[in-house]
Image: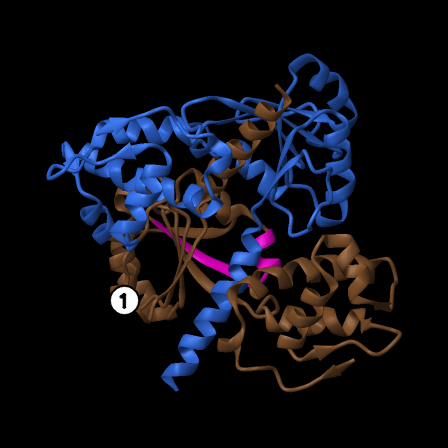
Chain colours: A brown, B blue
Amino acid sequence: MEINKINDPQTIPEPTLRRLPWYLAYLKLEADKGESYVSSTQIARAINVSASQIAKDLSLVNVSGKTRVGYDVNELVDVLENFLGFRSAHRAFLFGVGSLGGSLLQDRGLSQYGMEIVAGFDVNPEVIGTEINGLPVFGISEFAQKQAEMDISIGVLTVPVDQAQKVADKMVEGGIRAIWNFTPFRISVPNHIVVQNTSIYAHLAVMFNRLENQEALKK
Amino acid sequence: MEINKINDPQTIPEPTLRRLPWYLAYLKLEADKGESYVSSTQIARAINVSASQIAKDLSLVNVSGKTRVGYDVNELVDVLENFLGFRSAHRAFLFGVGSLGGSLLQDRGLSQYGMEIVAGFDVNPEVIGTEINGLPVFGISEFAQKQAEMDISIGVLTVPVDQAQKVADKMVEGGIRAIWNFTPFRISVPNHIVVQNTSIYAHLAVMFNRLENQEALKK
């Protein structure tokens, strides 16, 4: 396997960025089983993406397989985890310690993928001053001061939908550079702010619709 | 506003299905403010999707605005909530009551979007027999029997990645028709099974990458 200088990250298209974690998940399982090499054909068979697509995606992170033996599993795991940012600790504040927000504060999975939530903010006096999973919950009015102390890049947005834009504005004003938006509301932010929309409820709508189609086919 | 017979759901493309909940979220806020009519231009301005795209998406669910006054807000909320399946109770079993799975059992948001998780399954003797948020947690070996009693369509997959395929196989074997896959593993299932992949960690990778690009631009 040859590993060259990592490409300018700007050039990696989003569909590739979304597939790379699938390859990584599969490769980690193979590494656990003690496999040393895998071919793109093996990955393809396991995860239902074409071998040529896999080879193309991996070439974008400057990894190529060796003729006949394929990809070195452990090296590829290293390259992908580093490339995807899962080995760095990206610190984040979370806004809205309700049902979903409180759950995310307790999700140990996030830290395995490079995300370290360091504090939550809310307006509810019953949660302000408490700790969840060892993480402090502050009043939203304390955000400016905490941000001045900690200079956090990422804000997780889990407030009620009618507060989404207002809190997003406050985050941007305070110097947050990337917003992970879990609300179903499409927030407006300046161009230089990164927004990742993860509305799990939109996924529900797709699933319900597809399920209904399948049930209709049976009739 | 004219509401005709709902189109065959099969004909609705996934990008449209993903945008409809954004329109719905905005419309509900407008309804709360007491607005009676909105135009596609107003929706467009608020959520950053072109007015023509919005009109096209809404025509796919057989809704068209009235000349000059636009869409009737309350009617459109009704149509969208029904169309998206958010008003029905889609019952689901959850597999893997770990950190993320336990969080989902506690998320009150899901039931507002038509998803009713009725029980969890796990292999950990410490959680089997307990209740989370009033929902029972059974041993995975009890699944076949519970499924025979309840005939559940949807399975939420929140097991560790190395168990994902095995548990998905078991779900399909037991008669689950749609799998909401939260693991980063690409499961293989028969064609008639609906799979919705929601790997929040893949979204993290995209966000980290975009953030890095932005920080690089500043230097």
Relative depth, front residue between B170 and A102? B170
The reply to whether the magenta stretch includes residue A205 is no
Where disc 1 sits, the SS reads: loop
Q: Which residues are magenta?
A: A109-121
Q: Please identify the residue farthest to the top as the structure is shown.
A: B149
In what quadrant of the picture does the C terminus of chain B appear?
bottom left
Q: Position of residue B105 (x, y in %)?
A: 55, 32
- Which residue is at a point 54% across and 63% down the rendered structure image? B205
Label tally: 1
Residue under numbered circle 1: A190
Q: Position of residue B4 (x, y in %)?
A: 32, 25
* Lateral position of residue B45 relative to residue A75, left or right: left
The quadrant holding residue A193 is: bottom left
How crowded pointer 1 is (Cα within 10 Å; few <14, some 14-19, many 20+) is rated as: few
- Which residue is at a point 44% across and 46% down the rendered structure image? A199
* Lateral position of residue B64 relative to residue B35, left or right: right
Considering only vertical position in the picture, is A146 above or below A46? below
